[in-house]
Image (tube, rainbow, N blue to C red):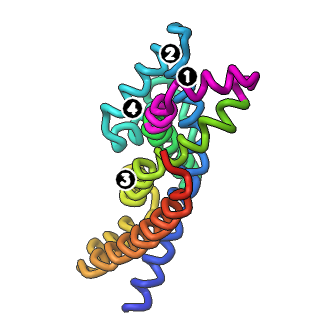
Amino acid sequence: MFQTVLLSLTEGFGKTLEIFVLTLLGAVPLGLLIAFGSMSRFRILGWPVKLVIWIVRGTPLMLQLLIIYYGPGLILGNNWWGSGASGRFTAAIIAFIFNYACYFSEIYRGGIEGVPRGQREAGQVLGMTNTQIFFRVTLLQVVKRIIPPMGNEVITLVKDTSLARVISVYEIIWNGQAFIKSQGLIWPLFFTGLFYLLFSGALTLLLGWVEKKLDYFKV
């Protein structure tokens, strides 16, 4: 029985890990683009982006998952995602990426705006373009500033992946709960907690290592 449980939880954790990795791959660059949009001097762009960020950050991720998956079919009469496991998984990834991109965008914005304006002006005096100033002056300082808050969001993402089960994505908690329904066993759920703890612990160590590597650059 233990081997059966362990195999099922490992399979579920594989799906959890897949959600985690794909979310970061999509949300990290998208968050930067959204940050630039919210900081735009053009109000016709900046205000709508800020409104979207406010809505996403102010509503539960679980609600966003349900709306993104069921919304097209119920509102538009066209289920974009299909009824299979691949469709549910795709909808979950889209919801996670968009949600975390909005959170990351605020972290980026705070990091960028936290760089003293005088440094950008100094770059302009030296004849550097805005692109050169961003990548050679601003970006290094932004990375240093955003690592701690980004790390907190990454750890939160580890646990938030469990929300994918609301649209029947078979992640690790779904697999653990299945043993309650089929065999009346609750102890597999405690083992799911162990998976989360080990994964979060490994990420904490990795993020701590990254922070130490950036210690050479003081801000």
Measured from the top left, where is residue 26 in percent x and y? 59, 45
Measured from the top left, where is residue 92 in percent x and y? 49, 47
Which region of the structure is painted magenta?
Answer: 107-131
Under circle 4, the secondary element is: helix
- Dot 4 or dot 3: first in sequence order is 4
User: Disc 2 versus disc 3: distance between alpha carbons?
Assistant: 30 Å
Under circle 1, the secondary element is: helix
User: Disc 2 versus disc 1: distance between alpha carbons?
Assistant: 6 Å
Query: In which quadrant will I find the N terminus?
Result: bottom left
The residue drawn where x is 31% and y is 69% is 177
Q: Nearer the viewer, mark 4 or mark 1?
A: 1
Amino acid of disc 2: Gly
User: Disc 4 versus disc 1: distance between alpha carbons?
Assistant: 15 Å
117 and 12: which is toward the camera: 117
- Which residue is tagged 3? 163
**Residue 37: which numbered mark, if any?**
1
Amino acid of disc 3: Leu
Residue 182 in the magenta stretch? The answer is: no
Residue 120 in the magenta stretch? The answer is: yes
User: Disc 1 versus disc 3: distance between alpha carbons?
Assistant: 28 Å
- Which residue is tagged 2? 46
Q: Is residue 186 above or below residue 21?
A: below
**Residue 56: which numbered mark, if any?**
4
Q: Nearer the viewer, mark 4 or mark 3?
A: 4
